[in-house]
Amino acid sequence: MILVIIERLYEAVEARGPVCLGLDPSPEFLPQGLVRTAGSLPEAYLKFNRGIVDATLDIVACYKIQIAHYEALGVEGLVAYRDTLRYIRARGAIAIGDVKRGDIASTAAMYARA
């Protein structure tokens, strides 16, 4: 199984380049119009992520989703995390769940809020 994902990643890097795009949204960096119209912050995260994925699918080898940013929003945030993973996979792209602890300051701050 590991060999399969490594082969897929190698092929993606060869086809689109070596970029792994991080989807680590924070409220202060989202367009305020999107936050207002989404209905909730987790839904805004999901819509933002979909837009980023759609805009970069042909130039990115894979996507990394940092769970702390979603955990900080509770259960609804975890649903947005899950749905982001599903959205990426449905487009045939590689999604990496970044679930490590003891990360950089901005991520540690999100873990503290979770």
Image (cartoon, rainbow, N blue to C red):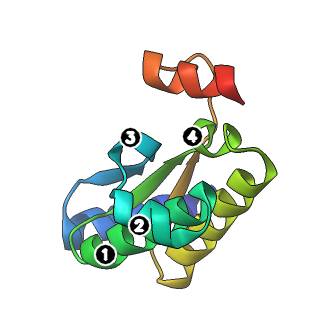
Question: Which amino acid type is shown beneath numbered disc 1?
Answer: Leu
Q: What label does residue 81 carry, if any?
A: none
Q: Which residue position holds label 4?
A: 69
Q: Quadrant of residue 82?
A: bottom right
Q: Residue furthest bottom?
A: 91
Q: Find residue 112 and report its horizontal and vertical position in percent.
A: 66, 19
Residue sitting at 36 percent across and 65 percent down?
33
Instruction: Between label 3 and label 1, give the one nearer the viewer.
Output: 3
Q: Does 94 appear above or below 70?
A: below
**Residues under labels 3 and 1: Cα distance?**
24 Å
Q: Find residue 24 and report its horizontal and vertical position in percent.
A: 45, 45
Instruction: Between label 4 and label 1, give the one nearer the viewer.
Output: 4
Q: Which residue position holds label 1?
A: 57
Q: Badge 3, how many Cα within 10 Å: few under 14, some, many 20+?
A: few
**Residues under labels 4 and 3: Cα distance?**
12 Å
Q: Is residue 11 left or right of residue 106?
A: left
Residue sitting at 58 percent across and 55 percent down?
41
Indicate the secondary structure of the residue bearing disc 4: helix
Q: Earlier in the sequence, mark 2 or mark 4?
A: 2
Q: Which residue position holds label 2?
A: 34
**Which sits in the foreground, 104 or 11?**
104
**Which sits in the foreground, 110 or 6?**
110
Question: Which amino acid type is shown beneath numbered disc 4?
Answer: His
Is any part of residue 26 visible from this angle? no
Q: What label does residue 28 carry, if any?
A: 3
Indicate the secondary structure of the residue bearing disc 1: loop
Q: Earlier in the sequence, mark 4 or mark 3?
A: 3
Q: Is residue 1 left or right of residue 20?
A: right
Q: Badge 2, how many Cα within 10 Å: few under 14, some, many 20+?
A: some
**Which sits in the foreground, 56 or 93?**
56
